[in-house]
Structures are given as C-alpha cells and as structure tokens.
Amino acid sequence: MNNTRNRFVHINQRIEHAFNQSGRSATDSPVTLLAVSKRHSLEKIHALYQLGQRDFGESYLQEALTKISSSDHEEIIWHFIGPIQSNKTRDIAQNFHWVHSVDRLKIARRLSAQSTERLQPLNICLQINISREIQKSGFSSSDIFTVMDEIIKLPNLAIRGLMAIPKPSDNIVEQKQAFMQLRQLKQKLNQEFQLNMDTLSMGMSNDLEAAIAEGATIIRVGTALFGPREY
Ligand SMILES: *Cc1c(COP(=O)(O)O)cnc(C)c1O
C-alpha cells in the first residue's frame, strides 16, 4: 500500500514536471493518467482508487470482466487497451467507457452496432502502427485516410483520437519522433475530415516524458505505478 502510494505520488510528479517542461499551458488539454492494471489484483486497483485514481486500463477481456463485475466503485472509468477479437466486441461495448485499440474497420463497425443500448457513445481511439512494425496491429498512417469516411458515419461512437505503441527505444529523440508523427497525423485527420479529435493516447512507463512533450493527453502507465505484473 505504501509502495503504491509512493509510486502514485512519483508518477504524478513526473507528469507535472514533463508538462511544465513541455511549454504546454494550463489552458491546453491536461494529461490524464490511465492506470494500466492488467495482471494486477483488484486490491491494488482499490488502493489506487482510494488515492483518487479513476481511470483504469485493461488488456485481457476475461480478466477485465471479472474485475469490473467485482468492483463496487461506480466512478471508475474503464478503458480497454488490448488486442480485440471480433467475437468479443459485444462484451467490450457493454462494459467499457473507452476503447483505445480499434485497429480495423470491421471492429469499429461491430462496436458501433453493439453500442445501441449505451446512454452515451462509446469513446474510441484508432490505433496507428506508427513505427510500421510488421507484427504490430493498427492502421498504417496512410490506410487510416481511406477508412475514415466509413468510421465517421458510424453512430454510437465518439471518435476521440489516436493511440500508438511505438517501437521501444531508450533514446528520447527517437521516442519523441514517433509521438510527433502521431500528433501530426491527428492534426491532418482533423483538418481533412473536419473532426474534433482531442485525444492522443501515447506514452507508457518508459517514455511518458517524451509523449507529454509531444502532446499526449492520456498516458498509459502500468509497471511504474504497480511494479512488475503479478501474473
Ligand atoms: C501493458 C500496456 C501498457 C503499460 O505498459 P508499462 O510499460 O507497464 O507502463 C500501456 N499500453 C498498452 C497498450 C499496454 O498493453
């Protein structure tokens, strides 16, 4: 518990410091800390909740559904950030507030069709394969322009922005490069399709400073907040 508190305080200091260094102003979009609780216990989620944390991210649907149904914290905002199988979209649409990992048109269509009973639209981010890695999912920076017209037409979805998991690097210049590309891509898409996307979901434990410098509005932090994953 003490460990969790210390890590939480420390991460918030890193965020504040990076924000001040970045030249972003207090009137710009703030940075939301998404606590990535995959493979960590409900007890740890509870401890962070008590400290004021509200946004939690999960990658594995079954594990997430168990946690969501056993948690009695109604104020938690649940984000799905993992790979999506098309036969799992209904459970995702019905249990989460946000989905960061929409990586195919088919998935967007299904999420929209299965969100008809939501009171509020499902917030989505489109995942971009920004470092063009063969094994990684996500739209390419050019393909996204060809599917956007279709995605925009889907009811029940709020297209909030873009998400990426760049190739890991220890070099801050390289880290920033990838995040800058995602920021510029969002700008271009907003212009070309007259959208109002306000979200850049980028930055994790090791590169959150670079992400904040390049305009991240949601950083997804697991290890630096919870320690090594438990299972
Ligand atoms: C696990 C995961 C994270 C958290 O990574 P850490 O390095 O533990 O901070 C962030 N984003 C996604 C998509 C993840 O799967």
Image (tube, rainbow, N blue to C red):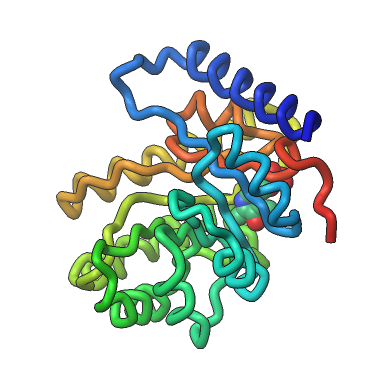
Report whether 115 appears left or right of 231: left
Where is residue 28? Give x, y as percent. Answer: 32, 23
Residue 50, percent from left and from top: 60, 37
Disc tally is 0
- Res. 212 in view: yes
Q: Quadrant of the C terminus?
A: bottom right
Residue in the foreground of this view, choosing between 140 and 197: 197
| Horizontal side, residue 116 vs residue 184: left or right | left
Q: Position of residue 138 (x, y in %)?
A: 51, 64
Q: Residue at x 66, y 23 (%)?
A: 9
Image quadrant where one finds the N terminus: top right
The quadrant holding residue 206 is: top right
Indicate left or right for 28 with 18 as reference.
left
Residue at left 18%, top 71%?
153
Above/below status of 25 relative to 229 = above
Q: Which residue is located at x 52 percent, y 82 percent?
A: 88
Q: Choose between 50 and 53: the one closer to the eye.
A: 50
- Decide: is 214 above or below 84: above
Judge whether 125 appears above or below 84 on screen: above
Towards the viewer: 197 or 87: 87
- Locate residue 30, reporting x and y percent: 39, 28
